[in-house]
Image (cartoon, helix red, strand yellow):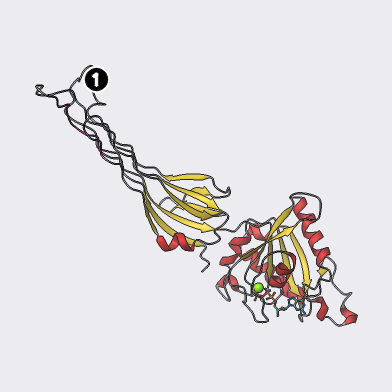
Amino acid sequence: MFIDETKIEIKAGDGGNGCHSYERMKYKPKGKPDGGDGGRGGSIYLVGSKQIHTLQDVAYRHRYKAERGAHGKGKTQTGRSAEDVVISIPLGTIVYDDDTGGIILDCLDENRRALVAKGGRGGRGNAALVSRNNPNPQFCEPGKLGEEKRLRLVLKVLADVGLVGRPNAGKSTFISRISNAKPKIADYPFTTKEPHLGIVKNNSGSFGSSYVVADIPGLIEDCHKGKGMGIQFLKHIERTSVLAIMVESTSVDPLGDADILLNELSRYSELLAEKPKCYIMTKTDLLPDDEKNKIPDGWLGMSAVTGDGVDVVLREIEGVLSHQ
Ligand SMILES: Nc1nc2c(ncn2[C@@H]2O[C@H](COP(=O)(O)OP(=O)(O)OP(=O)(O)O)[C@@H](O)[C@H]2O)c(=O)[nH]1
Ligand SMILES: [Mg+2]
């Protein structure tokens, strides 16, 4: 299941207590202090992974706890430090402190560990507490508590291009043609129920060797009021550099369809409304011959089924990307 928001509780391990003990030797009633220090409690780290595309596993487990450090022992034996806990999350996850609302981490780099809850330091044993003023400390320190937090995780997939269209506009057919993505395609609305990412080879010669396109569920009028699948999926195109606005060329009112999409984008956020956009009319193979050349100014026509016009669309998208 695709889960893009969840809350978890994390608790780092407490430090082990220091030990209060004295050297014992034959014929010596009481030796030097020899209580060892407690071990460090385990810390909790988050790490970004390209292999994970949903927060499902993280949400399922919900509570994460690292072990406490072992207590110190006599003969100045330091307690064992506990293992750290490392939680893998998808790249693009933003991690908030659920109590303060502040952002703790925006996970954009693969394999970089971020410390989110620090394990408690071990307490010192009485051996370590010996000083000139107190050569015989009759006490030791308790371990420090490990940090405890409630986190809210929000996944916003990382893509360069977002496909925006009404249901059935042909978004999934397009991404299947241009990339390795294989979303389900069908002639009924809301076939796509979660974002799909596809990697497209960049033939433009500028910027990198490839770029990422995101196919998201279709938008309908008033989806900002929760109609259809709602607009929660729009968060996945917030980080894109360009939006491809896709409408069916065979619709009774393609430009009206585009207005609905643009209105829904601006209802969601200024950020999406202001993003650079490419305007695409899909399914041109279904247009009668005499209408094939009547694509309005500022729009590009294509058929993802025959491939007609797809290259021109990609050049246009790559042109916008190269200026970002
Ligand atoms: N003739 C023709 N049919 C197309 C073309 N592109 C898509 N279709 C058909 O249109 C229907 C919908 O295509 P999808 O790619 O699933 O549309 P979508 O925009 O992803 O739809 P949702 O996931 O429901 O939002 C399918 O039956 C496709 O085969 C095209 O260029 N030409
Ligand atoms: Mg689809």
**249 to the left or right of 118:** right
**22 to the left or right of 233:** left
Residue 151, horizontal then vertical, whole percent = 43, 54
Residue 296, horizontal then vertical, whole percent = 84, 71
> Does the beta carbon at disc 1 come under 8 Å from ligand 2?
no
What secondary structure characterizes most of the magenta part?
Answer: loop
Seen at 63% across and 61% down, the residue is: 237
- Tell me if mark 1 has few (under 14), some (14-19) or many (20+) residues whose alpha carbon lies within 10 angstroms of its own: few
Tally of marks: 1
Seen at 69% across and 64% down, the residue is: 180
Q: In which quarter of the image is ligand 2?
A: bottom right
Task: Tell me which segment is drawn in magenta.
Answer: 17-23
Say if the magenta span includes residue 24: no
Q: Residue furthest top?
A: 132
**178 to the left or right of 131:** right
Residue 291, horizontal then vertical, whole percent = 87, 79
Q: Mark 1 points at which residue?
A: 131
For the residue pair 278 and 255, the one nearer the viewer reads as 278
Task: Say if 70 sits above or below 266 in the image.
Answer: above
Quadrant of residue 92 in the image? bottom right
Residue 138, horizontal then vertical, whole percent = 16, 28
Seen at 79% across and 62% down, the residue is: 314
Seen at 40% across and 61% down, the residue is: 61
Dot 1 falls on a residue whose secondary structure is loop
Amino acid type, label 1:
Ser
